[in-house]
Amino acid sequence: MTNQREPDYDALADRLTGDSPLEAAAVQLGSDAAASGREFLLREYGGDAAIRRAIRRGRPRVGDSTPGESATVRGRIGDVEYRAFMELVTELGKPQSELVREAVHLLLEHHKKLAS
């Protein structure tokens, strides 16, 4: 049993459909609206750089790479491995590229441990 109170749906329904007048929201236009929007973004994101990252068009960058195309690795795998890989894609619900990046990372970590 929880300590939460049941919402008062009757009071809510009365407030939304009753005779009490609704208060009009303040409407801002032009430069006032732009300034208000900017203040909101700065409060939410903390700074101009974070805002630019949040509204950047296109696919997200991989890691902390420089702007532009990220490096592409190509390779071929056998049918059995491909079917198993596609089953993993479906099972995990991750895109192929994310799994390939994870696999490369694990391979590099494995070889780093062998070298030390």
Image (cartoon, rainbow, N blue to C red):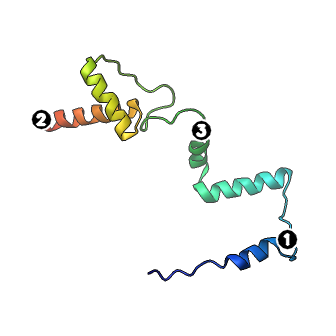
Instruction: Judge whether 67 appears above or below 25 on screen.
Output: above
Q: Position of residue 49 (x, y in %)?
A: 57, 46
> 111 left or right of 33?
left
Depth check: give the residue in front, 24 or 70: 24
Q: Residue at x 62, y 77 (%)?
A: 7
Q: Cβ–Cβ below 8 Å for labels 1 and 3?
A: no
> 100 left or right of 65?
left
Under circle 2, the secondary element is helix
Depth check: give the residue in front, 98 or 41: 98
**Image quadrant of residue 96?**
top left
Q: Amino acid at mark 1?
A: Leu
**Image quadrant of residue 87?**
top left
Q: Position of residue 67 (x, y in %)?
A: 51, 31
Q: Position of residue 91 (x, y in %)?
A: 35, 39
Q: Residue at x 78, y 51 (%)?
A: 34
Q: Earlier in the sequence, mark 1 or mark 3?
A: 1
Quadrant position of the N terminus in the picture: bottom left
Q: CA distance from mark 3 to mark 2?
A: 40 Å
Q: Position of residue 46 (x, y in %)?
A: 58, 56
Q: Cβ–Cβ below 8 Å for labels 3 and 2?
A: no
Q: Tell us which disc is closer to us: 1 or 3.
A: 1
Q: Amino acid at mark 3?
A: Arg
Q: Earlier in the sequence, mark 2 or mark 1?
A: 1
Instruction: Judge whether 8 appears above or below 79 on screen.
Output: below
Question: What residue is disc 1 on?
Answer: 22
Under circle 3, the secondary element is loop
Instruction: Judge whether 75 appears above or below 29 on screen.
Output: above
Question: What residue is disc 2 on?
Answer: 114
Q: Which mark is residue 56?
A: 3
Q: Earlier in the sequence, mark 3 or mark 2?
A: 3
